[in-house]
Amino acid sequence: MAIRNIITEKDPFLYKKCRKVDKFDKRLWTLLDDMADTLREANGVGLAAIQVGILRRAVLIDVGDGKGIRELINPVILEKSGEQEATEGCLSIPGKWGITKRPKHVKVRAQDRNGKFFEYEGEDLLATASCHEIDHLEGVVFLSHVVRMLTQEELERMRSPED
């Protein structure tokens, strides 16, 4: 397992559309394991394969709910409902945070690392993270959903512990 480099918003590769995963083999498993290491090292919530330079429909999400890292291969959002505003950032767009509008609830269908289909439903942060990472597979970054960017002062308040 290894830490991979995360490409940033300046790289045009980040805006490409990813291809479907059709081989569920050791190469995919290595990618997923490396992405997990990279996600942990970056202290992120989610990571898409395109962010580490691989044009495949694979994402990882870890919202800190005790369920660990979710591996989603070829994910599709089946249902969306409600609306929420959330603070959102991206490992490929370091230092920039914004308030986004996303669905409050989503239902997602995906495959696991062995190709088996599964579904899950998520609300709040899991809904936001699911939409964010699946957007990456279409070459879309969170900035297209931003209602308002956070100011430097707001970012500093987020980073410093309150007294």
Image (cartoon, helix red, strand yellow):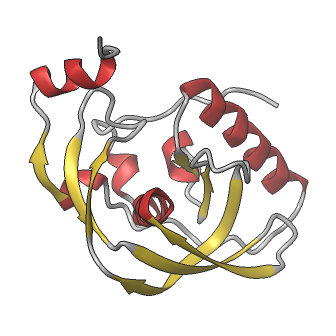
Specify whether 12 is left or right of 24. left
Residue lying at 74% horizontally and 46% vertically, measured from the top left: 31
Name the foreground residue: 57 vs 156. Answer: 156
Q: As drawn, which residue projects farthest toward the top?
A: 163
**Image-quadrant location for residue 122:** bottom right
Specify whether 122 is left or right of 24. left
How many discs mark residues in the rendered view?
0
Specify whether 47 is left or right of 138. right
Residue lying at 43% horizontally and 76% vertically, measured from the top left: 105
Q: Position of residue 112 (x, y in %)?
A: 78, 69
Residue lying at 90% horizontally and 53% vertically, measured from the top left: 26
**Image-quadrant location for residue 119:** bottom right
Residue lying at 32% horizontally and 19% vertically, measured from the top left: 159
Quarter of the image with the N terminus in it: top right
**Image-quadrant location for residue 156:** top left
Residue 95, placed above or below residue 83: above
Q: Position of residue 80 (x, y in %)?
A: 40, 84
Quarter of the image with the C terminus in it: top left
Q: Position of residue 51 (x, y in %)?
A: 49, 44
Q: As drawn, which residue projects farthest toward the bottom?
A: 78
Residue 42, placed above or below residue 119: above
